[in-house]
């Protein structure tokens, strides 16, 4: 079982360097964060779905993530409506009522439009995140973090976590089994308070065996000169090619385009079709 | 000798801050460029500490007080730093898995270069070159989970060789390897020594395995002092090994049993150099005099597996059609290389997983409906690393845990506790915290915590891994005692000595199938089984061949029987 099922296939997206993908990701998400223009947002949504297809990510790989995100978005939409059903009216300054529901809850075109915009705004970030995580080698990810200015010790810690996570996961399973054989009940039959206490009986040995491991790893890293200078190079870092520059230019162009649409056409972060 | 020593200890002592006594006393040792040195000693002799002093972990990571002088290439080490030392001495640590810091082989080899800010292209070129030296060039993008123990160790070796260090230090290189991989590791180290003319220092307690290839000098360490500094022939002929708790090579023990006085002229340091002219007759005479051990278990069956198959994904079988029958009171080993299905087998027995096909019977009864908890009262499992089992700070609470989870009254626990503590030799420590115990004692605590549930069968995963000869003997004699009380003991192991000395019968798994189920003497002399299970021919068999004894298996069995007689079991 792997946490991030990064898989090595050869697509134009996989060929890009991690640094490029990080930069593009940051530009596109900031554009999406900034704008409430449904036309721009739809453009980014379709663009990112196209990239998703291009990187040959299978639906089965991301199904679970998509389901969770949809549940989150729907809950979010319902709750924000319950808290402030007139937010759309405040923003767009007009009021076109569709139907009166109950008390202060009426459904307006403005509210509906605002919430659909917001839904698309969140939804268009998700494919971008998925693409970035699934097409970037974890240690290349670490190296790109370092290249955009994150301290390399922090960046390496990220890679190291990914390296040892499966080992620790396996330890956890083994310890759990051995403790169950001694009579530990982790099933739903046990009372909740017991289960919490029982879980501790797995966690404590796990912590001790992990500490042994940490000691070993830090020695191994010291002996091979980790942290001896202020900078380090990365084996996995990829060379920037013309493709990378095209990708970065494209994302910068989209970013500027979206900001431009807001600044010059809408003259606001919101696109208002009601006036 | 006119040559300048590359490593020079002069009246060197080291005292860890946390310890009451110095760990190293008054060490005087010169090592010359290009030498291949083996440092042996029992656990706690200070041999790892000596290694740490060389690579700079002492005094830069582990603090303590140094007296005297240690120079590497003429430079006083305490005035350097760990990074400068790592450019002169490359260390391959014991646990190749733990020291694998990269996500792939290539990355791991490159680690030191990354820290040196070597440009990417140059780094890739060098990684390729070094990977070729250890024959890993086709695995550069493999992750550690896809590699065998031996491949991980090759990677570690490449990772230190990329710095072009002059001295290679191996800290217990054999500890986690199966016999065949260990043999190959020793061969690789030897080849690299010959090709590169680097100075090689190996710290290891498994003397016979290291002596598979030539060694210039062996340094024997005990209680923090150098006890001996000589070549292998002289060492093996002396009484230093037995006096200091280091296992003698098996063939030497056999020669001694046969009444042969082992001396330097016989070149007994390596089985390959041994001259047997003087001992042939003695060995043959000895062999005829051994009384064969006629004891065969006629006890009823206690645990039976019939046509067991299992796979995790329904596609790739982990175990196929495994059948065997274990009799009550047997002591048996299950062997096979990593991935052969040994641990899956123990998981099936404990009920953690269910077989796809086949029946497991306890005393003739199918146990498929028994829960994990119920099975634990029949079959106990002791894991390899005691730290993976211990979850309470106090010994008493840890051992009582299984009973308390079964709501056994405290008075009853106290009664059982006294009995178990006595069996396990832990009675004096009844009210001690676990942190005060040694590794071997912790192991006993984990065994005690299983025994208190009164299982009829106990499965131990690598009970002696990483233990020196004294602790090995202690643990194994303790298991023999338990076995004598009527508990059936099943051991999953790589240790060929353990098989030979303690388990009359061995089940061998390879590729998920049972390839042998017979006497240990046959397993360890059958070329095909040895190859399939990643074992190695015992040196007793080689000795038999050298001495012109035709039936090598008979000779090995003779040795086992004789030894059992000596130890009166």
Image (cartoon, helix red, strand yellow):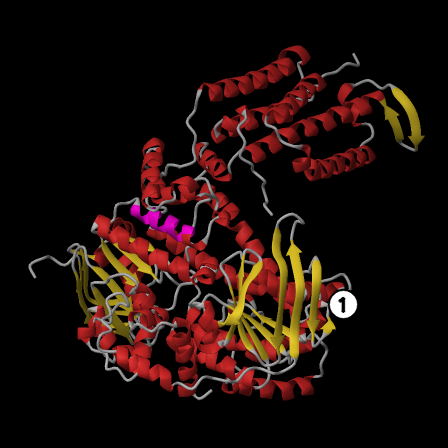
Tell whether B343 sits left or right of B403. Answer: left
Residue A115 quadrant = top right
Residue A132 visible in the snapshot: yes
Q: Is residue B156 magenta?
A: yes
Chain where mark 1 sits: B
Residue A120: x and y in percent read: 72, 26
Residue B132: x and y in percent read: 34, 42
Identify the secondary structure beneath mark 1. Answer: loop
Tell whether B509 sits left or right of B194. Answer: right
The residue at 52%/20% (across/down) is A247
Q: Residue furthest front?
A: B550
Tell whether A100 sits left or right of B80. Answer: right
Residue B331 quadrant = bottom right
Q: Which residues are magenta?
A: B151-161
Tell whether B15 sits left or right of B393. Answer: left
The residue at 60%/79% (across/down) is B451
The residue at 74%/35% (across/down) is A70
- The front one of B438 and B533 is B533
Measured along the vertical axis of the image, is residue B280 above or below residue A202?
below
Q: Which residue is mark 1?
A: B369
Measured along the vertical axis of the image, is residue A247 above or below residue B416?
above
Residue B463: x and y in percent read: 49, 71
Q: Residues within 10 Å of mark 1 (few under 14, many from 20)?
A: few
- The front one of B392 and B48 is B48
Quadrant of the snapshot with the N terminus of chain B: bottom left
Q: Is residue A142 magenta?
A: no
Residue B317: x and y in percent read: 62, 52
Measured along the vertical axis of the image, is residue B262 above or below residue B194?
below
Per the picture, the main secondary structure of the magenta-coloured stretch is helix
- The front one of A32 and B187 is B187
């Amino acid at each position: 079982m792997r946490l991030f099922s990064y898989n090595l296939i050869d697509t134009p997206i996989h060929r890009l360097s991690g640094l490029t993908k990080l930069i593009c990701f940051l530009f596109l998400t900031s554009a999406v964060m900034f704008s409430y223009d449904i036309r721009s947002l739809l453009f980014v949504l379709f663009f990112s779905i196209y990239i998703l297809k291009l990187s040959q990510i299978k639906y089965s790989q991301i199904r679970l993530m998509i389901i969770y995100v949809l549940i989150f978005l729907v809950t979010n939409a319902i709750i924000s409506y319950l808290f402030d059903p007139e937010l759309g009216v405040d923003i767009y300054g007009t009021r076109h009522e569709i139907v009166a529901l109950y008390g202060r809850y009426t459904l307006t075109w403005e509210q509906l439009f605002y919430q659909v915009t917001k839904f698309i705004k969140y939804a268009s970030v998700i494919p971008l995140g998925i693409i970035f995580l699934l097409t970037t080698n974890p240690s290349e990810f670490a190296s790109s973090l370092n290249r955009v200015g994150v301290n390399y010790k922090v960046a390496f810690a990220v890679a190291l976590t990914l390296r040892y996570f499966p080992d620790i996961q396996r330890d956890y399973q083994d310890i759990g089994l051995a403790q169950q054989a001694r009579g530990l009940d982790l099933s739903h039959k046990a009372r909740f308070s017991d289960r919490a206490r029982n879980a501790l009986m797995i966690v404590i040995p796990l912590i001790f065996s992990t500490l042994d491991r940490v000691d070993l790893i830090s020695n191994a890293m010291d002996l091979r000169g980790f942290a001896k200078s202020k900078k380090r190079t990365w084996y996995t870092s990829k060379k920037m090619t013309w493709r990378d520059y095209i990708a970065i230019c494209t994302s910068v162009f989209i970013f500027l385009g979206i900001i431009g649409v807001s600044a010059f056409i809408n003259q606001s972060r919101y696109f208002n079709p009601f006036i | 000798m006119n040559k300048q020593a590359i490593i020079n200890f002069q009246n060197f002592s080291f005292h860890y801050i946390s310890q009451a006594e110095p760990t190293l006393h008054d060490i005087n040792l010169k090592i010359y460029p290009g030498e291949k040195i083996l440092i042996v000693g029992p656990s706690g002799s200070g041999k790892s500490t000596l290694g740490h002093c060389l690579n700079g972990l002492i005094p830069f990571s582990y603090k303590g007080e140094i007296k005297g002088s240690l120079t590497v290439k003429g430079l006083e080490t305490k005035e350097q730093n760990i990074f400068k030392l790592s450019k002169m001495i490359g260390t391959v640590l014991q646990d190749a898995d733990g020291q694998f810091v990269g996500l792939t082989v290539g990355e791991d080899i490159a680690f030191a270069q990354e820290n040196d800010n070597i440009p990417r292209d140059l780094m890739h070129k060098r990684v390729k070159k070094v990977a070729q030296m250890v024959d890993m060039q086709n695995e550069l993008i493999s992750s550690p989970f896809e590699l065998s123990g031996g491949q991980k160790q090759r990677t570690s070796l490449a990772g230190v060789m990329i710095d072009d260090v002059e001295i290679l230090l191996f800290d217990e290189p054999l500890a986690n390897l199966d016999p065949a991989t260990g043999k190959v590791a020793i061969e690789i180290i030897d080849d690299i020594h010959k090709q590169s003319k680097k100075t090689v220092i190996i710290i290891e307690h498994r003397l016979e395995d290291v002596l598979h290839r030539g060694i210039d000098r062996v340094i024997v360490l005990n209680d923090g002092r150098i006890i001996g500094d000589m070549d292998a022939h002289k060492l093996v002929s002396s009484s230093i090994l037995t006096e200091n708790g280091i296992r003698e090579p098996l063939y030497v023990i056999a020669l001694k049993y046969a009444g042969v006085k082992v001396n330097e002229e016989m070149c007994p340091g390596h089985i390959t150099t041994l001259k047997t002219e003087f001992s042939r007759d003695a060995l043959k005479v000895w062999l005829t005099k051994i009384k064969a051990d006629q004891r065969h278990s006629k006890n009823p069956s206690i645990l039976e597996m019939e046509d067991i198959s299992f796979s995790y994904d329904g596609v790739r079988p982990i175990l196929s059609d495994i059948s065997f029958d274990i009799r009550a009171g047997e002591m048996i080993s299950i062997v096979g290389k990593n991935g052969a299905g040994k641990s899956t087998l123990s998981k099936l027995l404990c009920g953690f997983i269910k077989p796809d096909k086949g029946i497991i019977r306890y005393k003739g009864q199918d146990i498929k409906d028994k829960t994990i908890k119920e099975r634990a009262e029949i079959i106990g499992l002791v894991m390899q690393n005691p730290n993976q089992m211990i979850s309470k700070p106090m010994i008493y609470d840890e051992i009582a845990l299984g009973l308390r989870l079964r709501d056994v009254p405290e008075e009853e626990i106290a009664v059982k506790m006294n009995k178990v503590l006595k069996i396990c030799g832990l009675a004096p420590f009844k009210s001690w915290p676990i942190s005060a115990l040694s590794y071997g004692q912790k192991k006993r605590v984990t065994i005690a915590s299983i025994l208190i549930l009164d299982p009829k069968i106990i499965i131990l995963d690598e009970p002696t891994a990483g233990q020196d000869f004294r602790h090995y003997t202690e643990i194994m004699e303790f298991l023999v005692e338990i076995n004598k009380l009527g508990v059936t003991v099943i051991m999953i192991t790589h240790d060929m000595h353990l098989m030979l000395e303690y388990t009359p019968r061995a089940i061998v798994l390879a590729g998920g199938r049972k390839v042998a189920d017979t006497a240990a003497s046959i397993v360890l002399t059958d070329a095909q089984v040895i190859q399939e299970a990643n074992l190695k021919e015992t040196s007793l068999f080689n000795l038999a061949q050298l001495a012109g004894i035709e039936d090598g298996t008979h000779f090995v069995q003779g040795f086992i029987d004789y030894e059992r007689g000596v130890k009166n079991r």
